[in-house]
Image (cartoon, rainbow, N blue to C red):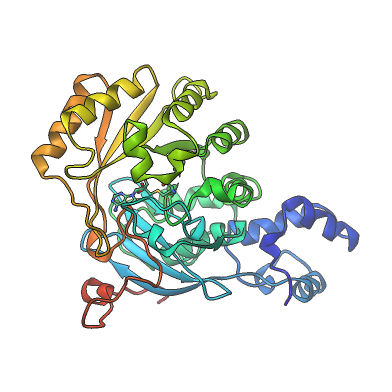
């Protein structure tokens, strides 16, 4: 098997080309073809000589993950099931909103953290994803949305403007005509910080405006169960936004819901958050899955306020998304609102998240790869609600 060119860093690739007597700017050109023009073969790289293209094709392959299935929710959310080269499956979820198009990507196949309420936890950890497999989710879904990216960075800007408001066209079209992924959240399957090196490598490629895809780090959010040393490292090494899954305001309950709390206590986690070098205008997001009768009382809300007092943050309250293998329940509307209200009254910025794509098991904590996708009759659940659409006309 030839190595996948996307598994090389730009430095490694540059020295590879230099060894072959090529100028280093050729490396940037290849990278732009891969990440900005989303090339799937060296043949397409028309500003390289035929000889160089042939040489590269002899030395390397270009990975392209297979979309094994896609399902569209009634609310427009689209879930993609990717099959990786070794047959493992992961999921990404595309979430259209008014002026943004967010892609939620996976960093591991499965997850080893065993959070009590999460569907992905039931799979266990299959393996870490490589940086290229993390980035490929963004590239492949971008191909679906816009099969023909324009050919230069400057051109890209013009294309965006001219497309605004144009509505339906080739491929998938959303809301205000947004045809490119504007935001990325690392909130799919897996714990990104347990796959630290590959995740940071992927982030470099996603954010690099010259060589890579060029998504601003301000538009990228990484969510973690709370691995304290890696959180510190991440905030020193990148400028992406941080979200932390909290889900309880005392160690006893958090330990039951999230076994990771036995390794890093709430005190360690919150002390770490207070000490992070976060720019003044930025805030940490705390996620709090609301579970009926478990962590949704007034006392729980007040405990959360005490815990987070003085931390510059916002709180995302996520009403539990049910899945077949869980006995947890979502609280009623009035309890959800009351919980949010208590936080608001204490001066917190609160966002009660409405589930997206829950009819296709694409909402938070419902991602399970190939498992759990059949109902009792053996039908695929997402065959029931999915509707297909034209991708490459
Ligand atoms: N491992 C990381 C990334 C996953 S993000 C993390 O835990 O932060 C997914 C978010 O959805 C996490 O906050 C997770 O706790 C939450 N979640 C998991 N199962 C859920 C469910 N069934 N309903 C609502 N949110 C859930």
Q: Is residue 385 above or below residue 27?
A: below
137 relative to 204, above or below? below
Q: Is 192 placed above or below 169 here?
A: above
Front residue of 157 and 297: 297
* Left-right relation of 328 to 253: left
**Closer to the camera, 133 or 325?**
325
Question: Residue at point 55% right, 48% down?
Answer: 194
**Relative horizontal placement of residue 172, taking residue 139 as reference (left or right):** left
- Residue 129, position as x, y percentages in the image: 57, 60
Task: Specify the quadrant that holds the C terminus.
Answer: bottom left
The residue positioned 58% from the left and 74% from the top of the image is 85
Q: Residue furthest top?
A: 310
The answer to whether residue 224 shows anywhere in this view is no
Q: Residue furthest left?
A: 334
- Residue 43 place in picture, x, y as percent: 68, 74
Residue 208's image quarter?
top right
Residue 231, position as x, y percentages in the image: 54, 35
Marks counted in the figure total: 0
Q: Quadrant of residue 23?
A: bottom right
If the image is split into quadrants, where does the N terminus sit?
A: bottom right
In percent of width and height, residue 169 lies at 35, 65
Residue 249 appears in the rendering: yes
- Say left or right for 122 vs 349: right
Q: Is residue 49 left or right of residue 63?
A: right
């Amino acid at each position: 098997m030839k190595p996948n060119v996307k598994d090389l860093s730009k430095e490694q690739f540059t020295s590879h080309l230099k060894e072959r007597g090529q100028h280093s700017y050729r490396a940037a050109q290849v990278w732009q073809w891969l990440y900005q023009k989303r090339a799937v073969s060296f043949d397409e790289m028309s500003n390289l000589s035929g000889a160089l293209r042939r040489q590269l094709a002899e030395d390397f392959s270009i990975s392209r993950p297979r979309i094994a299935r896609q399902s569209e929710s009634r609310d427009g959310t689209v879930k993609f099931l990717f099959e990786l080269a070794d047959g493992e499956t992961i999921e990404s979820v595309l979430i259209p909103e008014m002026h943004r198009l967010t892609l939620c990507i996976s960093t591991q196949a499965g997850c080893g953290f065993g959070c009590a309420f999460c569907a992905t936890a039931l799979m266990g950890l299959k393996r870490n994803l490589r940086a290229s497999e993390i980035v490929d989710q963004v590239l492949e879904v971008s191909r679906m949305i816009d099969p023909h990216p324009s050919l230069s960075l400057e051109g890209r800007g013009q294309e965006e403007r001219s497309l605004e408001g144009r509505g339906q066209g080739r491929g998938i079209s959303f809301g205000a005509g947004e045809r490119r992924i504007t935001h990325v959240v690392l909130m799919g399957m897996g714990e990104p910080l347990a796959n630290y090196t590959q995740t940071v490598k992927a982030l470099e490629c996603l954010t690099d405006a010259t060589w890579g895809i060029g998504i601003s780090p301000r538009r990228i959010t990484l969510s973690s169960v709370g691995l304290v040393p890696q959180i510190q490292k991440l905030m020193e090494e990148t400028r992406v936004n941080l979200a932390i899954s909290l889900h309880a305001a005392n160690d006893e309950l958090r330990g039951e819901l999230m076994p990771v709390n036995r390794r890093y206590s709430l005190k360690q986690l919150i002390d770490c958050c207070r000490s992070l070098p976060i720019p003044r205008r930025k805030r940490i997001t705390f996620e709090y899955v609301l579970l009926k009768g478990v962590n949704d009382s007034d006392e729980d809300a007040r405990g959360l306020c005490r815990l987070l007092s003085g931390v510059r943050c916002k709180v995302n309250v996520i009403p539990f998304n049910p899945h077949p293998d869980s006995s947890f329940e979502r609280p009623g509307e009035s309890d959800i609102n009351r919980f949010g209200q208590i936080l608001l009254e204490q001066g917190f910025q609160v966002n009660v998240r409405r589930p997206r794509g829950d009819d296709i098991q694409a909402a938070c904590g419902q991602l399970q790869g190939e498992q759990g996708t059949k109902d009792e009759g053996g039908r695929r659940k997402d065959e029931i609600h999915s509707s297909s659409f034209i991708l490459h006309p």
